[in-house]
Image (cartoon, helix red, strand yellow):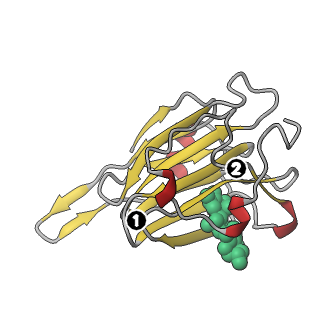
Amino acid sequence: MQIEEIPLKGCYLITPEIHKDHRGLFFEAFNQRELEEKLGIPLEFVQDNHSVSAKGVLRGLHYQASPYGQSKLVRVAKGEVLDVMVDLRPDSLTFGKHFKIRLSGINGKMIYMPKGIAHGFIALQDDTHFLYKCGEYYNKGAERGVIFSDPSLNIDWEYPREEILLSEKDLELPTLKELGK
Ligand SMILES: Cc1cn([C@H]2C[C@H](O)[C@@H](COP(=O)(O)OP(=O)(O)O[C@H]3O[C@@H](C)C(=O)[C@@H](O)[C@H]3O)O2)c(=O)[nH]c1=O
């Protein structure tokens, strides 16, 4: 697997080695020992999540409040997304900045993000399967989010606004300013 640090400190792009043959392909989606060695940090994931989205579904931007923050290792098993991370760590040099990347079942790319990052994605194909490991359990009371269209974040979702599908919860998320951040 290849690892590159992306412009948000502590976030990494992971490209697995994909073995193709006449039957199809094979790759290691998670190898704790190798990933810990390459990232230089201990990893302890306690929950695996799997969501399925239709084209145009936008989930985000989500995080859990301290002390329930979640590191995440995210990937797409089928379909494609534009994945977006926003740095909400108050002491970070890249606070308020975002990074986006296309993840797909074809490119197999993954992102590791530490806690303190708000995360979201838009599905670019129907029946997109998004899989992720979390370093902390889901905690309903600690769920937080920032509205995807926050003008101060200025994220180009590269998708027509009128075709974006959101949950009612995500439609009502606050801006960073409203959160007092
Ligand atoms: C996230 C989550 C949701 N749920 C439940 C709550 C709700 O009834 C249903 C759907 O939840 P949501 O609408 O919050 O699902 P979703 O919008 O897919 O939320 C996810 O979005 C992406 C971008 C993330 O990064 C994740 O951390 C998570 O916040 O599933 C769990 O049981 N466990 C979980 O870990």
- Determine whether the beta carbon of the residue marked 1 sits less than 8 angstroms from the nearest atom of ligand 1: no
The residue lying toward the viewer, choosing from 37 and 142, is: 142
- Count of numbered marks: 2
Does residue 137 show up?
A: yes
Q: Specify the quadrant that holds the C terminus.
A: top right
Where, by quadrant of the figure, is residue 46 drawn?
bottom right
Left or right of 116 on screen, residue 17: left
Where, by quadrant of the figure, is residue 59 drawn?
bottom right
Residue for point 23% across, 64% down: 25
Residue 119, percent from left and from top: 63, 50
Q: Specify the quadrant that holds the N terminus.
A: top left
Instruction: Indicate which disc, 2 or 1, sits on the residue closer to the N terminus.
Output: 1
The residue lying toward the viewer, choosing from 112 and 7, is: 7
Q: Read off the residue under disc 2.
A: 147
Residue 69, percent from left and from top: 78, 52
Q: Read off the residue under disc 1.
A: 77
Residue for point 75% across, 43% down: 116
Left or right of 91 on screen, residue 54: left
Q: Residue furthest top?
A: 93
Q: Is residue 159 above or below residue 127?
A: above
Q: Kindly state the secondary structure of the residue where label 2 is placed.
A: loop
Q: Amino acid at mark 1?
A: Ala
Left or right of 132 on screen, residue 114: right
Residue 148, percent from left and from top: 64, 48
Residue 72, percent from left and from top: 62, 53
Does residue 45 show up?
A: no
Label 1 neighbour load within 10 Å: few <14, some 14-19, many 20+ = some
Residue for point 72% across, 29% down: 95
Q: Is residue 132 above or below residue 3?
A: below
